Amino acid sequence: MSFLELNNLQVGYEKGSSVLNDFHMTAEKGELISLLGPSGCGKTTTLRTIAGFIEPTRGQVLIHGRDYTKTPPNKRNIGLVFQSYALFPHLSIFENVAFGLRMRRVSSSEIKKRVAGALAMVDLTGYENRLPAQLSGGQRQRVALARAVVIEPDLLLLDEPLSNLDAKLRVGMRAELHRLQRQLGLTAVYVTHDQVEAMSLSDRVLVMNKGKIEQEGKPEEIFYRPATPFVARFMGFDNQFTGRVKSIGDNQVGIEAGTYRLTARPHFVPDVRVGDSVDVLFRPEVAQLQRAPGDNAVPAEIVFRTFQGNAGEYLVRCALGEFTVAVAETSPSFAPGAIHVHIAPEHLIVEKHTDE
Amino acid sequence: MRRSPLLLAAFIIVFTFLLGPFLIILIASFSGDASMAFPPKGFSVQWFRKVLEVRMFRDAFWTSLQLAVASTITALALGTPVAYALVRFHFRGQNLVEILFSLPAIVPELVLGFGLLQYFALRANVPIFPGLYFGHTAILFPYAVRVVSTSLRNFDPAIEEAAISLGASRLKSFLLVVMPNLRAAFLAAFILAFITSFNNVSVSLFLTGPGVATLPIQMLAYMEMYFDPTIAALSSIIIVITFAIVQTAERAFGISQHI
């Protein structure tokens, strides 16, 4: 049995429309699971159901084998971290962190010890007497983290905790979060719409769409082998063209697209047959620009180029459509005009054609 | 910004009509003459002294003060949970409830006063002060609900949920986390309701009776008999005290953002 189990969960806000339907999810002890998806996919609803703020119309929430489905949120021993930090504005940092311990009637000497420990853990020793308004965003989120873990929760739930921080801080906080979760051996559920965040933090990622799990797996699996068109697009397979399957081999699929013959990875092959119309997808980073024609290359024309600091991006147009191609800044630059776009077979994925 | 003479004229007119009456009353209350006149003849502070000496004003002041404090506290105590329910929960018939609770603020006060008279004094035979108390609580209630719910709406619900997830019950999280952060809003609601009650004429008019009168009603009664500057002096005192209270509260808590 898993440490956290959501069984057959159904959550509906209004009659008829349900946010989650027959939802299953598990987490092992000490694991960090990400719920990844666009807004409205049901990831926050899932989190709030685990926390107890939403009561499911059907199904069970099991933590450590105990049925928590009907337990009110204040009796669940779950640590919560919010996007808005949600610190108590009128209380000092010390009292913010001590709040959960006071609710548990921990003795004041013990509170002092544990709050000091928690603040040291997030590197905020010396900030005890400040008010939340006197702290920076990153510091506030560290207080929120300390406040959530000081109660030694069975489960740590994080709802887009880094979304309010600027890009540089986000990377630092990500590392800190990761270290803390490992160090304390906490089981955590992490809600995010940011695939990079999910990739770098999680043991397992659940990609959600419209209240359902599209794919569940290790970050590498999700990143390199998206199981559905939705996941592929969400994971950055931004370029797409249509083609027809010509042959299916053990290690590759032959594709005819327009007048071109290309080879692709057979990843989605199980539900694709020879002669089927398919979508072929690839990431902007894996395409290469070259002057000479070659295998798996399509003649194209550079429309324009944007500079993005450490990388450049080209917009190219060819007979198959418009693609974006990302290149490292150190690579030779190409003048507008004729070019060839090469994509290695292992980077081309094939899926059944949809009219989306 | 370029000053347009038209804008300046509008400015002067508005201020004349807003502040002019207050100024006239303030000046008239220092009159040396026994009848109200403007500009006053002579200068004296005798009318202020008289205000303090007249028994009926003192009694009416205490009645008004007690009434305002009691009905304000009651309206806030009843209005806060209602505001909380309206903001935090969604239930069927919510709009209807919202309209129902704001009725006393929409219905003309004279109609409300007459209704309350019918109900309390004539049917239920409620004594005068309790009748006033119920009547004032009814007119203050919508203000309390409005001010408290406005500031509750601006209060991040995640903060409350954080408290709950840390082990606080909903009531505890409200008392320990929400209330302390809505202090300014409560103060604003208190002052607004207090002043509304203290100045109310239309509802009190129906509900006062022998021996019990609020200050505004007593002032009306006094003016029917005498026309000396005592009323002006009393009005000046009320204006100055009201202004002082509002100003102090604004300085200390910035209450105007909650009204």
Image (cartoon, coloured by chain):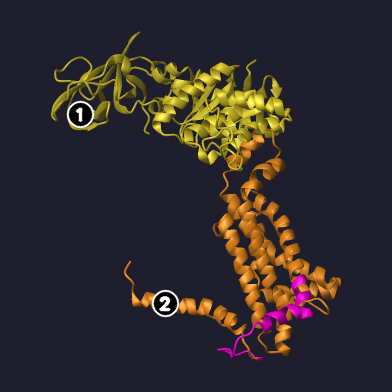
Q: Quadrant of residue A170?
A: top left
Point out the residue furthest to the top here. Answer: A250
Which residue, given by chain and number where applicable, does mark 1 sit on? Answer: A318
Mark 2 Cα-neighbour bin, 10 Å: few <14, some 14–19, many ≥20:
few
* Residue A111 image position (x, y, % from top left): 68, 27
**Which amino acid type is shown beneath numbered disc 2?**
Ala
**Magenta span of residues:** B34-62
Describe residue B207's horizontal placement relative to residue B155 as left or right: right
- Indicate whether B218 appears above or below B92: below
Q: Secondary structure at mark 2?
A: helix
Residue in the picture at 65% in, 42% down? B177
Which one is in front, B114 or A350?
A: B114
Which residue, given by chain and number where applicable, does mark 2 sit on? Answer: B10
Distance (Cα) linking label 2 and label 1: 67 Å
Q: Examine the rendering and report whether any part of residue B259 can be seen.
A: no
Residue in the picture at 26% in, 18% down? A343
Describe residue B173's horizontal placement relative to residue B55 as left or right: left
Which one is in front, B112 or A22?
A: B112
* Residue B29 image position (x, y, % from top left): 62, 82
Q: Which chain is yellow?
A: A
Circle 2 or circle 1, nearest the eye: 2
* Residue A312 image position (x, y, % from top left): 24, 27
Which image quarter holds the C terminus of chain B? bottom right
Disc 1 is attached to a residue of which chain? A
Which image quarter holds the N terminus of chain B? bottom left
Residue in the picture at 71% in, 62% down? B72
Q: Secondary structure at mark 1?
A: strand
The colour assigned to chain B within the rendered structure:
orange
